[in-house]
Amino acid sequence: MKIDVNANIMDVNNAYAAQNRDLLEEKGILVINIMGSPGAGKTTLLEKLLSNWQKQMKVAVIEGDLATAKDAERILACGAAVVQINTDGGCHLDAKMISQVLPGFDLEETKLLIIENVGNLVCPAGFDLGEDLRLVVMSVTEGADKPSKYPSAFLAADWLALNKLDLLEYTDFDMEAALADVYAIKPSIQVFPTSCRKDKIQGLDKLAEAVIQLVEEKQKQANK
Amino acid sequence: MKIDVNANIMDVNNAYAAQNRDLLEEKGILVINIMGSPGAGKTTLLEKLLSNWQKQMKVAVIEGDLATAKDAERILACGAAVVQINTDGGCHLDAKMISQVLPGFDLEETKLLIIENVGNLVCPAGFDLGEDLRLVVMSVTEGADKPSKYPSAFLAADWLALNKLDLLEYTDFDMEAALADVYAIKPSIQVFPTSCRKDKIQGLDKLAEAVIQLVEEKQKQANK
């Protein structure tokens, strides 16, 4: 008897993802799945974006971590609705986890749902959560070879935030080589150079605006 | 019928790990499994350590990556024997992969085997490869909250290289908080503050020496 365990796991995940997608589509909520290595700056980037978004719309956030509610506390302080999922050692969020926490949000009022995945440049890329868009955050301190060495994350991504640009001058990060690799893996990817450091903020308004534009399109589709 | 897939996978891994450990024990080879996030600086740290070790002993290196042989090429340039394992999307090395590449090395002459795991602060910690010692590399640019948010890696570690100290002054990394969390998770962990950046080298001799001491102990045990 041959048991194809992996296919089974993915089938179950995809079924939950489709269910999440249907529900969130119906409510006209744009969903972004944020992925990246530990310390790429995902939560800090999200804090900065929230301070822009919160003025104009209701945002919900799902935080994924192995342990602690540290990220959820930071997001709560930004005024967004937030649920923390602790995977207890698990290396990624899956669509079932998302489906289980969705009822905790006011889906009628929410216009944007951000899912911050577990910090991991490998496993999250394999799991559809029901999102509309995948944003990979990569910091320049990680080194220019990361796209070619971890291609699955960049292949799965729609957008890339190339973060911690404020530290670029102190590293030997080869921007040209990194971008060449990124575009070779995913020609359609949209790259947002960003820095979230106080007094060195860069590229955040452009990223925030690009999301707002997608939120508005999603709203239009839902109302038609 | 209940199939406990995870237990089965771990049993198989542990059997290969025990086999690796027996073989390497017999040959008197010290084995270090290096883990850490993508971009923590594992390969650069290893390059620097090799330039110290290569003068006095034969070192073998196994490089684990999803794709490319970039790291193996860098290690080869340091004069060490190296085999690159490409996991083709896999998020960690397992003991079977190690057992398959061991015959490629001159185990009679080798005194130290370094396994650089896939860049991932989550999954590698769960897989015994047959190593004597686990070294986690974490860079200060990743942020001080990483130990508490990714406890499994630090719990699994014997040593921690707290790396990229040269960038400390440009970050808001809280050293005291990070170390308090690390020691709370693993009181016995030994911490090596390091910087590998040209002109800002720090802590490498101490780490290199600590390894050499263990290699010598291992040799004594094997010869008795």
Image (spheres, coloured by chain):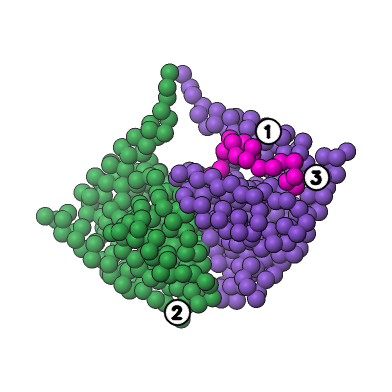
Chain colours: A purple, B green
Q: Which residue is mark 2?
A: B200
Q: Which residue is the site of mark 3?
A: A218
Res A61 visible: yes
Q: Disc 3 vs disc 1: which is toward the camera? A: 3
Q: Residue at x 63, y 73 (%)?
A: A198
Tell me what residue is drawn at x 43 percent, y 30 percent. Answer: B5
- Mark whose residue sits in front, 1 or 2: 1
Q: B220 or B207, which is in the foreground?
A: B207
**Residue A106 painted magenta:** yes
Magenta residues span A91-111
Estimate how packed mark 2 is, as few (under 14), some (14 to 19) or many (20 or more) residues with alpha carbons within 10 Å.
few
Q: Quadrant of the C terminus of chain A?
A: top right
Residue B76 is at least partly visible in this image: no
Check the image and name the residue furthest to the bottom.
B199
Q: Are marks 1 and 2 in contact (CB under 8 Å)?
A: no
* Mark 1 crowdedness (10 Å alpha carbons): few <14, some 14-19, many ≥20: some
Left/right of residue A217 with respect to residue A92 in the rendered view: right
State the image quarter where residue A73 is shown. bottom right
Marks 3 and 1 belong to one chain: yes
Q: Residues within 10 Å of mark 3 (few under 14, many from 20)?
A: many
Which of the labelled discs sits on residue A18, or is there none? 1
Residue kind at label 1, given as amino acid type: Ala
Determine which of the numbered discs, if any, sits on residue B162 in the image. Answer: none
Q: Is A18 drawn above or below residue A158 in the view shown? A: above
Cα separation, mark 3 vs mark 2, equals 50 Å
Tell which of B59 and A74 is nearer to you: A74
**In the rendered structure, which disc, 3 or 1, sits on the residue that comes first in sequence?**
1
The chain holding disc 2 is B
